[in-house]
Image (cartoon, rainbow, N blue to C red):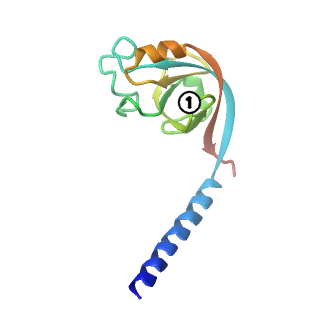
Amino acid sequence: MASRLCYFFISLLFFSCNKSAIENEKEYSWETIRVTASAYNSVASQTDSDPHIAAWGDSLKPGMKYIAVSKDLLRKGLKHNTPVRIEGFKGLYLVKDRMHPKWKNKIDIYMGTDVKSAKLWGRKKVIIDYRTKALE
C-alpha cells in the first residue's frame, strides 16, 4: 500500500511539473541573430580590478557557461540571465556580463582563466539563438 501511495505522489508531481513547464514555454520564443564572438577570461588585464565579478554582480567561476554581450544586444532582448545557444558550442549559455559600450553586435564567451583557449578561439562570426518573451 505504501509503495502505491508513493508511486501516486511521484506521478502527480511529475505530471504537474511537466504541465507547468509546457505552459511556461509558451510564454517564450527563440530569436536568431549572427554576431561576432570572441572569448574572455577572469584576469585583471581583460576586465577590471575584480575579474571574478561580472557587471550584474554575478560570480564568474571557470567551467561556467556564461557570456558577455554588447549594449546594443541588451536592447534586442539579451538581458541578464537570458539563455543562449551558440553555434559550435554544446549546451546553453547565460548572459552574465556586459561589454564596453564601444562594441556592437558582439558577444564574449567566458573561458575561465584559460587564456590560451581564449586566444585559440580568436574572433568568429557565429549564429546564436536566444530566448525572449513571446509577444501576446
Viewed as shown, does residue 49 lie left or right of 56? left
Please tell me whether residue 113 is drawn above or below residue 66 in the rendered image. above
Element class at badge 1:
helix
Q: Which residue, as the protein is rendered here, is positioned at the far left?
A: 49
Instruction: Name the residue type under label 1.
Output: Leu
Residue 61 x, y percent position in the rendering:
36, 31
Of residues 81 and 129, which is closer to you in this image? Answer: 129
Of residues 9 and 57, which is closer to you in this image? Answer: 9
- The image quadrant of residue 25 is bottom right
Q: Which residue, as the protein is rendered here, is positioned at the far bottom?
A: 1
Residue 130 x, y percent position in the rendering:
61, 37
Residue 56 x, y percent position in the rendering:
40, 32
Please give the name of the residue rendered at 69% of the width and 34% of the height, measured from the top-left corner. 32
Q: Which residue is mark 1?
A: 74
Of residues 124 and 75, which is closer to you in this image? Answer: 124
Please tell me whether residue 133 is drawn above or below residue 26 in the rendered image. above
Please give the name of the residue rendered at 57% of the width and 36% of the height, measured from the top-left corner. 84
- The image quadrant of residue 23 is bottom right
Please give the name of the residue rendered at 56% of the width and 30% of the height, measured from the top-left corner. 74
